[in-house]
Amino acid sequence: MADGTPEILRRLDRTIWALVAMIAAIVLAGPVVSNFHIEWRGLAPTIAGTVVLCAGAWVYRHWRRDLRLEAGLQCTAQLVAFTAVGAPLSYIAAAAGAAFPLQDVTYEAIDRALGLDWRGMLTWMNEHTAAHWVLMLAYMSFTVQASLTVLALAFAGHLVRLRIAMLALVLSALVCIAISVVLPAQGIWGFYNLSAADYPAIVPATRELHLPIFHGLRDGSFRTLSGLGSDGIIVFPSFHAALAVIFMVALWPVPVLRWFGVVVNVLMLVATPIDGGHYFIDVPGGIVVAVLCLAAARAVAARAGRAPSPLAMTVTQSRTNSPAI
């Protein structure tokens, strides 16, 4: 039996879509109030995909009446739409962050004060290429894990929990982006001015690839907003670390995936400094953001469950379970 009445699920979906719409409005306003321009060719596939998924969700809500299939389609649409507008928002934020000084010196000093040696970890990775390969795969598993989390929770009937995970993901991204505006950093690859000679035996996932875009956003020479192919430019807090926590928590009630989620996401956390080009302090920063946003998402879901509605009363009378939050 799926958890959550249709009305509670609709309230949560409206909240998530409202956040996505707000982000989209900011991105669309970018070219109007500044010299940014949108690369529509890169956004067109995601827009089309979102429309198709939403149409499928509508069919299973109003015609075929299957809450699980509707949830899988609905939340996949939310994920696709958010990915399309979230990356451009981070670019706009990086441009706004040019008004604030880079904090790399501070982050690197915190790492050293904690006795954490980033260069030592890079050396270890170069000496243990098989271990790095496993860690890099875990770091790059975001798309697979996000899709797996949506489908697993939908078909297992954890429909409220699925919306909580989606809402926490969106909120975590917004918090990380907001913090990156006032506490910007180029990341450790740029700060140490590393090159391929510094990692001869491995190929870290991000390396210095984002630096031309990041510095271009700060100096005004890069002004393209695109949903597909955008580079991650947020350093502190680590959004990857936040995602690792959200995925672990979301998958915990699915027995067949519980320990898979723990193992892969612990590996993702370990991989984040090298493969994400992060300072060590970025990782606990992302974990704190995830914990707070999960708590906020649960509070929103609890409030949605308490709000009375005639539809909820009707569903209750027809023996649909109340939400397990």
Image (spheres, rainbow, N blue to C red):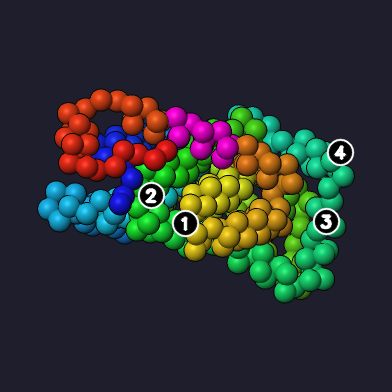
Q: Nearer the viewer, residue 166 or 139?
A: 166
The C terminus sits in image quarter: top left
Tag in front: 2 or 3 = 2
Tag on residue 254? 1
Tag on residue 113? 4
Q: What's drawn in magenta, residue-wise?
A: 289-299
- Compute the Cα span from label 3 to label 4: 15 Å
Tag on residue 158? 2
Mark found first going from the N terminus, 4 or 2? 4
Tag in front: 3 or 4 = 4
The residue tagged 3 is 119
Q: Could you say which quadrant of the image residue 292 lies in? A: top right
Dot 1 amino acid type: Val
Residue 167, percent from left and from top: 42, 40
Q: Nearer the viewer, residue 159 or 270?
A: 159
Dot 3 amino acid type: Arg
In magenta segment, residue 146? no
Mark found first going from the N terminus, 3 or 4? 4
SS state under label 3: helix
SS state under label 2: loop
